[in-house]
Amino acid sequence: MPVVDTRQSAGEKLNARPDDQRKDIHNSDVPLLCRSCEARHRGICGVFNAEELTEFARHTRRVNHASGEELIGEAAGIDSYATILRGVVKLTKTLKDGRQQVVGLQLAPDLLGRVFGEESRLTAETVTDVELCKIPRKTFESMLAADSDLEHRVLLQTLRELDEARDWMVTVGRKTAPEKVASFICFIATHFHPTAALAPGKSVSFDLPLTRADIADFLGLTIETVSRQFTRLRTDGVISIAGNRHIEVADLERLRARCG
């Protein structure tokens, strides 16, 4: 007998309800914590209507971590996943002799954790104070298997992260030091201000989430080289620096021109 797929996507389940029973994700039936969540609409929860979001929220819990905490170690078993609600997490690989490479950054509303993996292939560490919305691994994987819309959203995020990883392969392997530092600043600027790319000439400001040492690890440079390139960009008027971490970019297009 042919196998019949009885799964329904979130959209199909919503459309199957009478009009008077449909839930709007913006209405008062949404759990209070979810209504106040800035990451909800852009993250994996964006596929849920109010009823489904309420069910999802039953299995989640919010946790806070201070800067510098290890969330999961390389080769550690995975027992939960988490949506990043606030803050920045760095992903690293460490060689046997202790040398470390920052291989990625995750920001709200990224999903933290290797889906369907038995163990972590990376170390995840907070570089700012971070707020997470955690869900047990088995619960989330069961929901993925039952909801094609959720599965599709996770796949899109995974593909975006793959594209970013490939871009950084080019940055680290082929770009010059000035281009690497400019590319890093542009990457952070556009993640903190995703609509800025649509407004040419718009200025943006933000606090760098990484130290100079972490930026050097991320880009395969020395700390001294990173510092010199920041100074050069500031001297040329491409960026302004207040204190050690606060950056203002007067014109993103001018910064992009430095990215190679």
Image: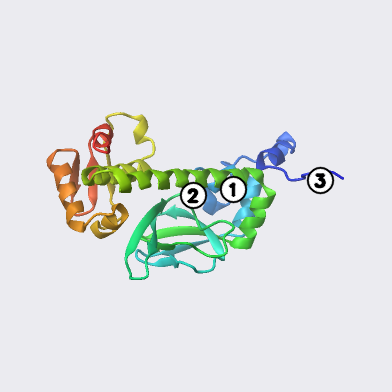
Query: Which disc number belongs to residue 36?
Result: 2
Tell me: 90 left or right of 41.
Answer: left
In the rendering, at what x and y percent does residue 39 appear?
A: 47, 48
Out of 150 and 243, give the one closest to the viewer.
150
Q: Earlier in the sequence, mark 1 or mark 2?
A: 1
Residue 128 appears in the picture as rendered? no
In the rendering, at what x and y percent does residue 200 appear?
A: 30, 28
In the rendering, at what x and y percent does residue 223 appear?
A: 20, 57
Callout 3: helix, strand or loop?
loop
Q: Can you identify the residue that label 1 sits on?
A: 30
Furthest residue to the bottom?
97
Q: Residues within 10 Å of mark 1 (few under 14, many from 20)?
A: many
Say which quarter of the image contains residue 101.
Answer: bottom left
Image quarter where the C terminus lies is top left
Q: Residues within 10 Å of mark 3 (few under 14, many from 20)?
A: few
Give the residue displayed 38% in from the left and 67% down from the top.
69
Q: Can you identify the residue that label 3 sits on?
A: 3
